[in-house]
Image (cartoon, grey):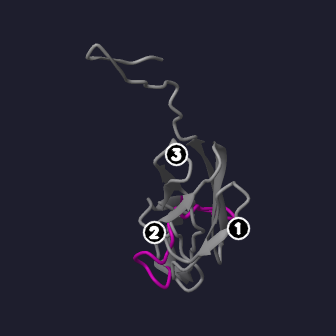
Amino acid sequence: SSTTYLVDFGDGSPTQSLNHPPPATICHTYTGSSCVSNAPGYTFSITATNNCDQSVDTIFPVKVYAGPTSNFTINPNPACVNSSVAFMNTSTPGYNNQCSQNGTYTWNFGDGSANVMVTNLNPQSHVYTTPGTYTVTLIAANYCGGDTITHQVCVEPAPTPAFRISISEVNGDASSKK
């Protein structure tokens, strides 16, 4: 038989052409959420063609959701003790089962302070009161799962002068000593 099968996954990826008999299982990895431009889902189709006719079968909707991807930047780094440090949440939110980008972001600043949980990408700020290197953790989560990332921030002590200046007038001259 000269039956062929054309498989379209509905996500813009190349179609797949198969000869008879087709495999029992057809695998495909969707690389993006169906929420972005195809809500409520992708349309999978398989077309069987031979010399006599053509037949099409579809599956709709193929719903593909995505978990978030955590990321953030720190400014400044290194930072000074008792000064505000900004943490910019640059995470990719993903899509939940309602095609919403709702999720939670949990910050741990690594210094024993309470975790901060928010539901937006707004930047966070934190003040470190003791010099050291701190591991900052951000957990992004939604209906589809979670993702964790860590970065380190170096907090330096305030500079301490290592000299003294003593000005004395001797015969009209000013001098300094270390």
Q: Nearer the viewer, mark 1 or mark 2?
A: 1
- The kind of residue on which mark 3 rests is Cys
- The kind of residue on which mark 2 rests is Asp
Magenta part of the chain: 18-41
Label 1: how many Cα within 10 Å (few below 14, some 14–19, many 20+): few
Q: Main secondary structure of the magenta part?
A: loop
Q: Is residue 126 left or right of residue 111?
A: left
Q: Work out which quarter of the rendered image holds the N terminus and state it.
A: bottom right
Q: Is residue 23 above or below residue 122?
A: above
Look at the image and tell me whether residue 123 can be seen. yes
Residue 36 shown in magenta = yes
> What kind of element bears circle 2?
loop
Can you tell which mark lies on residue 11? 2
Q: Is residue 29 left or right of residue 43?
A: right
In this rendered view, identify the residue nearer to me: 49 or 120.
Answer: 120
In 3D space, how far apart are the residues under numbered discs 3 and 2 (Cα atoms)?
Answer: 49 Å
Could you say where residue 168 lies in the image, as x and y percent from the top left? 37, 21
Could you say where residue 139 lies in the image, as x and y percent from the top left? 65, 63
Residue 117 shown in magenta = no
Could you say where residue 24 lies in the image, as x and y percent from the top left? 70, 65
User: Which residue in the protein does label 3 denote?
Assistant: 80
Query: Residue sitting at 54 percent across and 56 percent down?
Result: 71
Q: Where, by quadrant of the figure, is residue 128 drawn?
A: bottom right
User: Which residue in the protein does label 1 denote?
Assistant: 114
**Extreme residue toward the right, this view:** 112
